[in-house]
C-alpha cells in the first residue's frame, strides 16, 4: 500500500491491546444502559465530543506524564463485540429489545476520531489529553476502557518520573515490583510505564519480552542461604576470560584472596571469620556467571562477611581476566553501608593495585521511595543503582489519578457540567490547545481556544485567562507555539494519522520534556503551578453558558 497524503501514516493493521481482558465489556454497566437508552431515543448517532482530562496533578506535584494512549488506540482499532458478548449484554439489560443486539453487532469505531497529546508528554490539569468525537452511542462505550487504560498508566509513569527526578540522571533505576504489584496487569503495566517514565530496566521478564525493556536483576537471600559450605562445590574449574588458561580449583583461589585481604595493612582486624555458606553461594554464582558476577551481601553481616567474601571472589575472577559487576544491599542503613562498602572497595583497589575495583556498582533496595532516596541524598551515599518495587508500582503515595471523560459538545451544541466545586466544572466546546514557549525555551502556559479561533502566533501578544477566576490573566508573547492535540484515529488504520511510536521513543520524549521544564515546577517541596488558561473568547463563552445553564435561585 502507498503511504497516504501526509506521509506519516502507517499502513499496517493495528494490533489489539496488550491485555486480552481489554474488550468492550471491560466497562461499567451504565455505559451499556445509556447506549440502550440513546438507541431507544434514536440519539445513538448524534455527533458527540468528549474530553478526557484530569483535575489535579498527583503526588503533590505540579506535573503529570501522559501515558496509555497507544493501548487506547489499539483497543479502539479493534473495537467489536462478539456474539457471546452481545448476548451477555442483552441478558444484563432486562427488557431490552432484540433489535438493540443488531445495533451492537454493527458497532465499531469507523466513525470515531481521536485527537490526543502525544504519549510521554508532560501534561497539566484541565487540558484535554484526548478529544474523542463520534456517534454518542459508541463513544459512550469508550469512557471506562479509556479511563482504565490512561489512569494507572499516567499515574505510575509520573511516579517513575518523580523517582528519577529525586535519584538524579546518573543513577540506574531498576523496577523490581512484579511480586508486589496489584495483580498480573498491575505488574505488566507498571513495568511498561515505569520504563516510559524514565526507569532503565525491569526485573519482570514478561515485560522485557513484550516491550523490549532491558532486563536486570541480582539474586535473592534464598540463593545465599541455600548453601551450607564450600564442600558442596564439586566442579571447581574455571577457564580464564580469554580461554587461554584454566584454574583447576577456583575455591582455593578465592580462599587465598580472602586471607590476603584479611591481612592487608589497612584492613587488619576489620573482619575475622566470614560466613562460609555465604562464600560458597558467591563462588557458585561466580562459576555460573563469571562475566556478570554480583552478590547480595546482607544475608549475615554486610561489612564483616558479605563485602569481604564478595571481594575475595571478585579478586579471584580478576586473576582470570573477569570484571565483577558489584553488590546489592537490601537492609540496614543504606547511606552508611554504601559508603563503607565504597571505602572497602577503594582500599582494595589502592593496596592491591586493581584498577577499577573501587568503581564497582552498589545497588540498593528495600522499601525505597522518593522520601528515602531524598534522605539518602541529604546524608551522602555511594549507591549507583536503586531497585524499587512496592512504593513505585503500587503508587503507594496516591491511589489514582482521577482522569475523567466529559461531554463537551453534542450536535455542534457546546455542553457544560456545572458543580458547586468550581474545579469540577467542565470546559465546554470542541477545543484546540496550544503550549506557548517563552524566551528561555521553557513552556510558559497551555491555552485552550474554541475550535475555529485563529491559532496563537509567534511574537504576537495574547491574553491568557484562568478559565474560572476572573482576576487571573496574563499577556504572553510566545516564542514558539506547539499545537497539543494531534490526530491518532480517523475511523480506520488506513486514514492519515499519527504513528504509534515504539515505547523507547515515547520514553525519550518523556525524558526530554521533563528536562525542559522550568525547575520551580519540578521541585518536590511547594512547586510552582504551571499555568493553564483559555482564550478571552472561550472565557466569555464558558461564563455565558454557565449563566445560561445555572438556574437562578429564589430567596423566600
Ligand atoms: N540512611 C537511611 N536514611 C533513611 N532511610 C533509610 C536509610 N537506610 C535505609 N533506609 C530505609 O529505612 C527502612 C528500613 O526498613 P526496615 O527497618 O524494615 O529494614 P531493615 O531492618 O534494614 O531490614 P530488613 O528488611 O532485614 O528488616 C527502609 O525503608 C529503607 O529504605
Ligand atoms: O522493597 P521493594 O521496594 O518492594 O523492592 C523489592 C523487594 O523485593 C525483594 O524483597 P523480598 O521479596 O525478598 O522481601 P523482603 O525484602 O520483604 O524480605 C527485594 O529484596 C526487595 O527488598
Ligand atoms: O533482581 C533482584 O535483585 C530483585 C528482583 C525483584 C525483587 N527484588 C530483587
Ligand atoms: Mg526487601
Image (cartoon, rainbow, N blue to C red):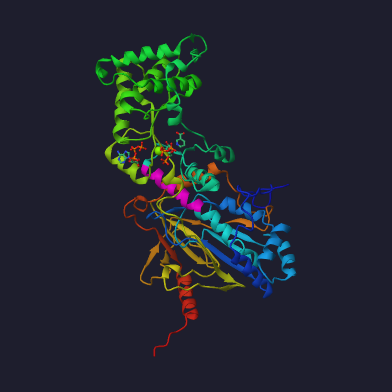
Quick check: can you spot residue 323?
Answer: no
Question: Does the stretch in magenta take in 153?
Answer: yes
Identify which residue, 335 or 415, lies in the foreground: 335
Q: How many marks?
A: 0
Nearest the eye: 21 or 347: 21
Residue 283, image quadrant: top left
Q: Residue furthest front?
A: 228
Q: Quadrant of residue 318?
A: top left
**Magenta span includes 543:** no
Horizontal side, residue 107 vs residue 389: left or right: right
| Residue 111 picture location, percent across and down | 68, 62
Closest to the observer: 236 or 468?
A: 236
Predominant secondary structure, magenta span = helix
What residue appears at the point 42 percent right and 88 percent down from the top-left corner? Answer: 554
Where is the C terminus found, in terms of image quarters?
bottom left
Q: Position of residue 539 (x, y in %)?
A: 45, 71
Looking at the image, residue 513 lies above or below residue 468:
above
What is the x, y in percent for residue 194? 48, 44
Q: Is residue 515 left or right of residue 33?
A: left
Let me know if residue 303 appears in the view: yes
Q: Classify residue 314 as left or right of residue 304.
A: right
Residue 428 in percent (x, y) is at 51, 70
Name above or below for residue 360 compared with residue 170: above
Magenta highlight range: 152-166
Q: Ligand 4: which quarter?
A: top left
Between 104 and 357, the residue placed more toward the observer is 104
Q: Is residue 464 above or below residue 150?
A: below
- Who's the residue at 36% across and 68% down the image? 472
Tell me the quarter of the picture where residue 421 sits.
Answer: bottom left
Amino acid at each position: 500500500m502507498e503511504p497516504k497524503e501526509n506521509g506519516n501514516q502507517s499502513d499496517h493493521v493495528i494490533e489489539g491491546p496488550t491485555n486480552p481482558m481489554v474488550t468492550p465489556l471491560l466497562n461499567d454497566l451504565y455505559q451499556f444502559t445509556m447506549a440502550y437508552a440513546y438507541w431507544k431515543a434514536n440519539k445513538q448517532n448524534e455527533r458527540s465530543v468528549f474530553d478526557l482530562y484530569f483535575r489535579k496533578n498527583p503526588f503533590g506535584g505540579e506535573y503529570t506524564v501522559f501515558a496509555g494512549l497507544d493501548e487506547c488506540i489499539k483497543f479502539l482499532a479493534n473495537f467489536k463485540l462478539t456474539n457471546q458478548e452481545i448476548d451477555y449484554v442483552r441478558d444484563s439489560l432486562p427488557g431490552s429489545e432484540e433489535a438493540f443486539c443488531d445495533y451492537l453487532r454493527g458497532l465499531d469505531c469507523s466513525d470515531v476520531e481521536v485527537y490526543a497529546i502525544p504519549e510521554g508528554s508532560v501534561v497539566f490539569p484541565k487540558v484535554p489529553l484526548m478529544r474523542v468525537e463520534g456517534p454518542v452511542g459508541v463513544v459512550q462505550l469508550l469512557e471506562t476502557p479509556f479511563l482504565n487504560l490512561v489512569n494507572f498508566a499516567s499515574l505510575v509513569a509520573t511516579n517513575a518520573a518523580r523517582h528519577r527526578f529525586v535519584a538524579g540522571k546518573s543513577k540506574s533505576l531498576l523496577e523490581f515490583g512484579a511480586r508486589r504489584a496489584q495483580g498480573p496487569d498491575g505488574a505488566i503495566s507498571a513495568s511498561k510505564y515505569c520504563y516510559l517514565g524514565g526507569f532503565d530496566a525491569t526485573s519482570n521478564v514478561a515485560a522485557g519480552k513484550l516491550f523490549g525493556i532491558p532486563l536486570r536483576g541480582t539474586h535473592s537471600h534464598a540463593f545465599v542461604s541455600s548453601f551450607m559450605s564450600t564442600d558442596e562445590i564439586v566442579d571447581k574449574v574455571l577457564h580464564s576470560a580469554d580461554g587461554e588458561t584454566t584454574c583447576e580449583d577456583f575455591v582455593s583461589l578465592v580462599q587465598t584472596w580472602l586471607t590476603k585481604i584479611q591481612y592487608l595493612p589497612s584492613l587488619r582486624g576489620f573482619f575475622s571469620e566470614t560466613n562460609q555458606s555465604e562464600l560458597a553461594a558467591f563462588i557458585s554464582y561466580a562459576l555460573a556467571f563469571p562475566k556478570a558476577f554480583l552478590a547480595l551481601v546482607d544475608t549475615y553481616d554486610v561489612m564483616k562477611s558479605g563485602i569481604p567474601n564478595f571481594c575475595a571472589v571478585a579478586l579471584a575472577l580478576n586473576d582470570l581476566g573477569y570484571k565483577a559487576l558489584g553488590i546489592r544491599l537490601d537492609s540496614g542503613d543504606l547511606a552508611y553501608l554504601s559508603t563503607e562498602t565504597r571505602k572497602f572497595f577503594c582500599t582494595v583497589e589502592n593496596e592491591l593495585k586493581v584498577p577499577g575495583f573501587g568503581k564497582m556498582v552498589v545497588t540498593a533496595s528495600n522499601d525505597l521511595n522518593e522520601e528515602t532516596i531524598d534522605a539518602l541524598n541529604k546524608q551522602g551515599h555511594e549507591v549507583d543503582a536503586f531497585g524499587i518495587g512496592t512504593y513505585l508500582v503500587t503508587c503507594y503515595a496516591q491511589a489514582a489519578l482521577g482522569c475523567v471523560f466529559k461531554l463537551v459538545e453534542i450536535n455542534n451544541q457546546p455542553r457544560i457540567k456545572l458543580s458547586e466545586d468550581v474545579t469540577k466544572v467542565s470546559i465546554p466546546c470542541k477545543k484546540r490547545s496550544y503550549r506557548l514557549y517563552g524566551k528561555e525555551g521553557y513552556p510558559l502556559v497551555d491555552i485552550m481556544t474554541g475550535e475555529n479561533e485563529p491559532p496563537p502566533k509567534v511574537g504576537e501578544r495574547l491574553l491568557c485567562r484562568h478559565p474560572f477566576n476572573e482576576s487571573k490573566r496574563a499577556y504572553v508573547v510566545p516564542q514558539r507555539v506547539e499545537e497539543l492535540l494531534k490526530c491518532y484515529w480517523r475511523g480506520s488504520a488506513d486514514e492519515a494519522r499519527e504513528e504509534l511510536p515504539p515505547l523507547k521513543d515515547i520514553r525519550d520524549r518523556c525524558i526530554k520534556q521533563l528536562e525542559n521544564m522550568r525547575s520551580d515546577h519540578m521541585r518536590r517541596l511547594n512547586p510552582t503551578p504551571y499555568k493553564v488558561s483559555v482564550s478571552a473568547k472561550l472565557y466569555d463563552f464558558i461564563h455565558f453558558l454557565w449563566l445560561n445553564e445555572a438556574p437562578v435561585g429564589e430567596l423566600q
